[in-house]
């Protein structure tokens, strides 16, 4: 058989090389690379040569081969266990830095008291906001940015909104997509799922975007017996053990509390927590606040008639702090165990639903700051305020406006630090599409200090953290956020960022990935007891860990 002549091979080599070169350019510089790749088509001679060669290159055989390859890859992804593959990377690797800054020197924060709840797992490991008071603070160290390594695990299109850690330091994760919800046990090293339990499907809520639906997919807690207590979309509370008799990962449903009689059809459970006496408090989106007493089996409910979209906090004095879209409350249990309003304080809820929030009202879970104060944010039109209240009376002690005029909002909890709190700006984030093509939401992270009955902004950072649920390590003195830099090349680069909690200066940022699949979309930064940081994304999990 005679070998193909060079004259027949050359026309195929040119478009092949052009395609490969185009892919390299797009991978390297991002979406703007597509413009550069298509630019030669504006020249008639080049256009004729490229398109003509492409027609010769793409025949029926190559098309068939491509279909087979795509089908094989799709089948491989479906058959492989979740977490075995990394999250598919995006484009723009050479136009965004992989690391900025330097390793931090640990400067521990003292003076923050975090009472251990007797009915919850250890502080830092029991719910999205770390503890009963929603401090978002850890007593152990997080990454210092010392030769950080990044590992990712792909779970398809599934985000794990809340993470906790059992006694074996395995991740207990409440995850879901726009329709389904699942409880998983995840190995922290391999990041693969060890066991799973399918929860009731998430209902479609008219007038609510899928990514704003909080019904049965945002909050759960780990109790003192290492059991996951989960609010489901069908108005039940399910309790799961997380280990078998040998300590191996296993989810087994052991208790069911049906609240469908107390919570009407069309409403849904949002969050739940035990108080210091072991009663389980819960809230619904429609404004119901309820208490279940395990000793008697009775459920009692109080109807606020006001929308609830945030979790709540509890303290050692019996206080349960709940913020609605209209007012801030302290609840207590009366002698019969029924919910009773101890005080109600209105706040400035503004006149509109700001972009970046789930309702026209406060976007924060109330944070117990110290023995005297509890804090929230309001929704004032010009500039949002961080507002400190007296825990006993509800009286406003002081408030401080934060961020730029007309560009301030938050949908995340405040972070407790010595003598104050830290707040993140989420203004402008209306969904994953809002931060595509190199765009970002409004910048801003601020620290507000309290001195007696006065409070003031200590510092403001221009870091952009669209929805990160920030956390602080009291051991390292670093605030951790999940940041996104605006990029003129149209590249979506996401960064795990450490900020000095005392000064507000950024210490380091490590790129975790490129593209929309790395968007955390309101999932929290979570620091493991071994010092690793976990961030759930729209497609799986990211882990950042110091090598040294």
Image: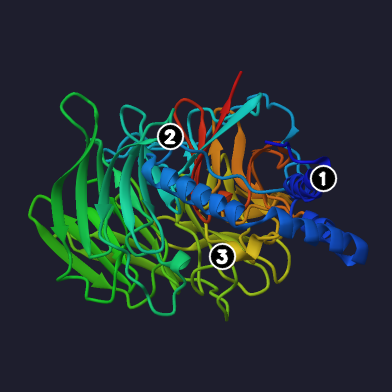
Among numbered discs 3 and 2, the one appearing first in the sequence:
2
Looking at the rendering, which quadrant does residue 125 occupy? Answer: top left
Q: Residue 486 at what x, y percent from top left?
A: 74, 55
Instruction: Find the distance from the CA under tag 1 to the CA under tag 3.
Output: 48 Å
Among numbered discs 1 and 3, the one appearing first in the sequence:
1
The residue wearing badge 3 is 431
**Residue occupying image coordinates x 59% and y 40%:** 480
Q: Residue 281 at what x, y percent from top left?
A: 26, 57
Q: Residue 420 at what x, y percent from top left?
A: 58, 46
Q: Is residue 297 shown left or right of residue 33? A: left
Numbered tag placed on residue 498 in the rendering: none
Q: Is residue 456 shown left or right of residue 257? A: right
Among numbered discs 1 and 2, the one appearing first in the sequence:
1
Q: How many marks?
A: 3
In the displayed structure, 96 sits above or below 59; it is above
Outermost residue, left side: 296
The residue wearing badge 1 is 10
Quarter of the rendering occupied by the C terminus? top right
The residue wearing badge 2 is 191
Colouring of the image = rainbow
In the displayed structure, 419 sits above or below 146; it is below
Q: Residue 530 at what x, y percent from top left?
A: 47, 25
């Amino acid at each position: 058989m005679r070998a193909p002549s060079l004259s027949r091979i050359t026309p195929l080599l040119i478009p092949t090389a052009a395609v490969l070169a185009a892919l390299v350019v797009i991978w390297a510089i991002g979406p703007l690379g597509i413009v550069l790749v298509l630019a030669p088509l504006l020249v008639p001679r080049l256009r004729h040569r490229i398109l003509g060669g492409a027609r010769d290159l793409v025949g029926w055989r190559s098309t068939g081969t491509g279909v087979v390859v795509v089908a094989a890859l799709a089948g491989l992804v479906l058959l492989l266990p979740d977490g075995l593959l990394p999250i598919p990377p995006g484009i723009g690797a050479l136009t965004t830095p992989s690391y900025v800054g330097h390793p931090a020197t640990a400067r521990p924060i003292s003076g923050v008291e975090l009472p251990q709840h007797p009915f919850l797992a250890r502080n830092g490991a029991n719910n999205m906001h770390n503890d009963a008071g929603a401090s978002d603070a850890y007593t152990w160290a997080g990454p210092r940015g010392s030769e950080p390594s990044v590992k990712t695990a792909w779970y398809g299109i599934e985000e794990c909104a809340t993470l906790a850690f059992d006694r074996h330091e395995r991740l207990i994760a409440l995850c879901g997509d726009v329709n389904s919800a699942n409880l998983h046990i995840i190995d922290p090293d391999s990041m693969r799922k060890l066991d799973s339990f399918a929860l009731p499907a998430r209902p479609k809520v008219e007038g609510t975007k899928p990514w704003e639906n909080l019904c049965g997919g945002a909050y759960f807690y780990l109790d003192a017996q290492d059991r996951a207590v989960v609010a489901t979309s069908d108005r039940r509370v399910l309790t799961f053990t997380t280990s078998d008799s040998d300590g191996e990962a296993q989810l087994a449903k052991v208790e069911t509390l049906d609240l469908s009689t107390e919570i009407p059809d069309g409403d849904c459970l949002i969050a739940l927590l035990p108080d210091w006496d072991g009663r389980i408090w819960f809230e619904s989106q429609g404004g119901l606040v309820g208490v279940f007493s395990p000793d008697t089996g009775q459920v009692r409910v109080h109807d606020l008639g006001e929308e609830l979209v945030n979790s709540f906090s509890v303290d050692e004095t019996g206080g349960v702090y709940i913020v609605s879209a209209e007012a801030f409350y302290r609840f207590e249990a009366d002698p019969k165990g029924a919910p009773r309003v101890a005080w109600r304080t209105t706040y400035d809820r503004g006149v509109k639903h700001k972009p970046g929030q789930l309702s026209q009202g406060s976007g924060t879970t109330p944070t117990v700051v110290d023995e005297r104060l509890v804090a929230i944010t309001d929704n004032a039109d010009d500039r949002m305020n961080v507002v400190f209240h007296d825990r006993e009376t509800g009286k406003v002690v002081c408030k401080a406006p934060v961020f730029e005029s007309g560009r301030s909002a938050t949908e995340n909890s405040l972070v407790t630090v010595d003598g104050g709190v830290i707040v993140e700006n989420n203004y402008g984030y209306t969904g994953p599409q809002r931060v595509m093509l190199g765009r970002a939401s409004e910048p801003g992270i601020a620290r507000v200090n309290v001195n007696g009955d006065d409070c003031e902004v200590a510092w403001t950072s221009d870091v952009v953290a669209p929805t990160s649920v920030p956390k602080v390590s009291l051991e390292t003195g670093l605030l951790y956020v999940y940041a996104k830099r605006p990029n003129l090349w149209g590249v979506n680069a996401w960064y795990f960022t450490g900020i000095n909690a005392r000064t507000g200066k950024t210490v380091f940022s490590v790129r975790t990935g490129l593209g929309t699949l790395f968007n955390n979309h309101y999932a929290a930064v979570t620091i493991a007891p071994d010092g690793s940081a976990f961030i759930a994304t729209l497609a799986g999990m990211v882990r950042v860990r110091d090598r040294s």
